[in-house]
Image (cartoon, helix red, strand yellow):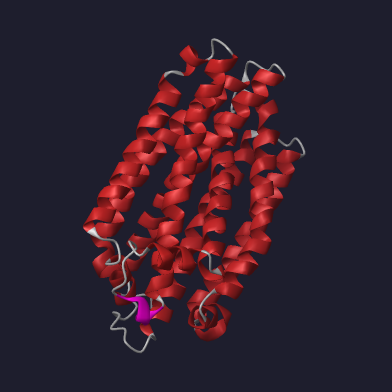
Amino acid sequence: MLDLALVLVFSLHLLAVDLAMAGPLVAVWLEWRGARRPEPDAAPIARRLAGWSLAAGIVGIGLGLLALAVLPGGEAEPYRRALQAVSPARWWYVAEELLFYVLFLVAYVGAWRWFQSGPAGRAIHRGLGIIAATDLMYHFPPMFAVLSTISTRPALWGESLGNRPLYWKLLLEGETFSRVVHHWLAAVAVSATVGLLLAAKQPQRRPWFARIALGATVAQLPVGVWVLLSMPPLMQQQLMGQDLLATILFGTSLIAALGLMHHLALISLRDTSRGAVARTAALMLLTVFIMASVLHRARNEALRQLPTARARPSRWR
């Protein structure tokens, strides 16, 4: 049950931070497009999406803290050791960056009308949204991807993320950077799917969001291959048949992703019914949950096999 609870919290956390990261960028694009056309009905959707992104960011922070609170009993020991690479000073830096994000996005959402008075104001306003989003994207997926890489390498346990040359070396390796790109694309897909839901009164806008989500999801195919090929051999073996449950979950995630692409393509081709949008959103939720399950299972089973690991036995057996 602890594994399932951790995966559920992690999935909800991923959905929240994905929207928090890329939602403001999609909102900026939508408002910019609406101003150029002109299409005045685009701005209200963009503002709602930005507001949802801010709320998701706050929820994501809370879920992240909850995951860290239950982590000692839910993850393998090597990952807990990797977390020790984050010093107290680094955690304070994380808190500062999160506060920076919240303040800039509050300004972006709260001062929406004030900034729309002229070209200069609109440019500053869009800059607030872009800075908030890119700050989150730059700091957090790379940091946690590096921690994941450290967890698989016992020789690096005890190292600190304050070691900048080591941090950048690990970040630019395929094992790490492929995961960062995967998270960025997932953030775009999730944010565009939320845009689909928010465009309930403007169904003609739904194909825009569907095409963005579809493009990001299709791009995940080569990136997913990159992630798989860059994984440590122990994790690859779990997905390729050594662990039956991990293999089944992996295959199911691929089927769910293909189904998601199919439904996004239908909406892109003007099937903008509420039923189509609801099915697409449900498939997005399912895909994220299964992918999180795959990662958790394969990583824990692989880390248990490290020669110096004393990981707890899996409760999924």
Count how many numbered circles sit on residues in the image: 0
Quadrant of res 38: top right
Q: What stretch is highlighted in magenta?
A: 153-157
> Which residue is more in the foreground, 175 or 12?
175
Would residue 156 be counted in the magenta stretch? yes
Q: Horizontal placement of 33 versus 247: left or right?
A: right
Residue in the foreground of this view, choosing between 165 and 107: 165
Residue 219 position in % (x across, y down): 67, 55
196 over 148 or under it: above or below: above
Quarter of the image where the C terminus is located = bottom left
**Residue 1 in view in this figure:** no
Q: Residue at x 37, y 45 (%)?
A: 60
Tell me residue 268's x, y (percent): 73, 39
Identify the residue at image location x=36%, y=81%: 155
User: Residue 140 at what x, y percent from top left?
Assistant: 42, 52
Of residues 5 and 113, which is closer to you in this image?
113
Which residue is drawn at the image coordinates 43% and 45% (left, top)?
16
The secondary structure that most of the magenta stretch takes on is helix
Q: Is residue 76 left or right of residue 131?
A: left
Q: Is residue 253 visible?
A: yes
Foreground residue, 234 or 264? 234
Q: Which residue lies furthest to the front in this view?
A: 165
Tell me the quarter of the image containing the N terminus.
Answer: bottom left
* Picture coordinates of residue 175, whole percent (x, y): 53, 70
Task: State the residue lying farthest toward the bottom.
Answer: 307
At a point 39% along the width and 72% down the height, the residue shown is 150
- The outermost residue toward the right is 269
